[in-house]
């Protein structure tokens, strides 16, 4: 029993199923919805449709009917790549905000027995060659005194502190900043060497949180440490006096050249 009128919209050709009122393509013999044999006598005569039936559209409908899964693989691959891209962006965002390993406490009740800044000044002022070994704790205490928490030039971003971590052959300088009291970290790892009498640190790693970027993008990381470099601009002028730099586990040793 028909559930709808047999009237067809203008410029549209279909076979209306008398059982379920499903609109079928004119090429079908049986209803695509319920399987009942269609009354093809209700199709308009060829001379009635030749002025408005699009041959390309009819061909497309036939191809779709004969191969309904055509193009599905291509769509699946596209969706897969979209999922992978979204997952990569999400992972990068999470890694950016993760705290790096071995972050020292912001405050300590213990004071170092020596002042790193004073030891450095004495070594640089000495005429004879000297060697001094500084610990992470001594260096980070000195950084805490010299670099104060302050608002950055970017509204809403606050500079909290800077600290170093020493591993054999590698020293990592990290800046901690915060947005609405939510901390994030930018770090640059160096392999400090003195080559041909010149102190020449090599950038071997740049990270934001735990997100590593290619060392070739070192300018990005060094810009993030700009406040540290400015605070120690005076000390940086003495780097030409260094004869050797050795980084150990938790320590860094500086050896100076003798002065005339």
Image (cartoon, rainbow, N blue to C red):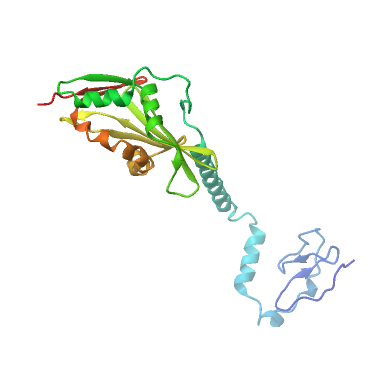
User: Considering depth in this image, is 101 or 51 the residue closer to the camera?
Assistant: 101
Image coords of residue 26 (percent x, y): 72, 69
- 199 or 93: which is nearer to us? 199
Who's the residue at 76% across and 64% down the image?
A: 29
Q: Quadrant of the N terminus?
A: bottom right
Instruction: Residue 180 in the image: state x and y as whole percent.
Output: 55, 43
Residue 244 visible at all: no
Residue that extends furthest to the top in the rendered view of this protein: 113
* Image quarter of residue 55: bottom right
User: Could one spot residue 136 in this view of the protein?
Assistant: yes
* Vertical position of residue 204 compared to residue 135: above or below: below
Foreground residue, 204 or 171?
171
Task: Please give the count of numbered marks on the rendered protein.
Answer: 0
Residue sticking out furthest to the left: 260
Identity of the residue furthest to the right in this view: 1
Where's the C terminus, which quadrant?
Answer: top left
Give the side of residue 28 with respect to residue 87, left or right: right
**Residue 79 percent location from the top left of the image:** 57, 50
With respect to residue 71, does 224 lie above or below? above
Left or right of 55 in this view: 206: left
Is 188 on the left-hand or right-hand side of 26? left
Q: Nearer the viewer, residue 134 or 251?
A: 134
Where is residue 49 shown, x and y percent of the image? 69, 80
Q: What residue appears at the point 36 percent right and 40 percent down from the top-left corner?
A: 227
Q: Residue at x 23, y 33 (%)?
A: 200
């Amino acid at each position: 029993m028909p559930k709808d009128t047999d009237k067809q919209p203008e410029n549209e050709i279909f076979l209306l199923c008398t059982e379920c009122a499903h609109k079928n393509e004119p090429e079908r013999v049986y209803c695509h919805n319920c399987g009942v044999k269609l009354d093809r006598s209700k199709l308009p005569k060829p001379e009635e449709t030749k002025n408005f039936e699009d041959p390309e559209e009819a061909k497309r409908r036939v191809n779709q009917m004969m191969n309904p899964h055509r193009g599905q693989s291509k769509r699946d691959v596209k969706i897969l790549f979209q999922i992978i891209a979204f997952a990569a962006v999400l992972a990068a965002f999470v890694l950016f905000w993760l705290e790096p390993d071995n972050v020292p406490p912001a405050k300590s009740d213990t004071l170092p027995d020596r002042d790193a800044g004073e030891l450095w000044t004495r070594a640089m002022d000495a005429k004879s060659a000297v060697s001094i070994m500084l610990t992470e704790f001594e260096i980070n205490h000195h950084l805490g005194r010299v670099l104060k928490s302050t608002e950055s030039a970017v509204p809403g971003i606050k500079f909290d502190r800077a600290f170093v971590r020493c591993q054999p052959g590698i020293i990592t300088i990290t800046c901690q900043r915060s947005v609405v009291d939510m901390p994030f970290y930018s770090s640059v790892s160096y392999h400090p060497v003195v080559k041909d009498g010149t102190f020449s640190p090599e950038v071997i790693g740049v990270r934001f949180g735990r997100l590593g970027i290619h060392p070739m993008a070192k300018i990005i990381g060094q810009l993030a440490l700009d406040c540290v470099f400015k605070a120690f601009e005076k000390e940086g002028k003495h780097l030409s006096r260094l004869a050797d730099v050795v980084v150990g586990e938790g320590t860094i040793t500086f050896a100076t050249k003798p002065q005339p």
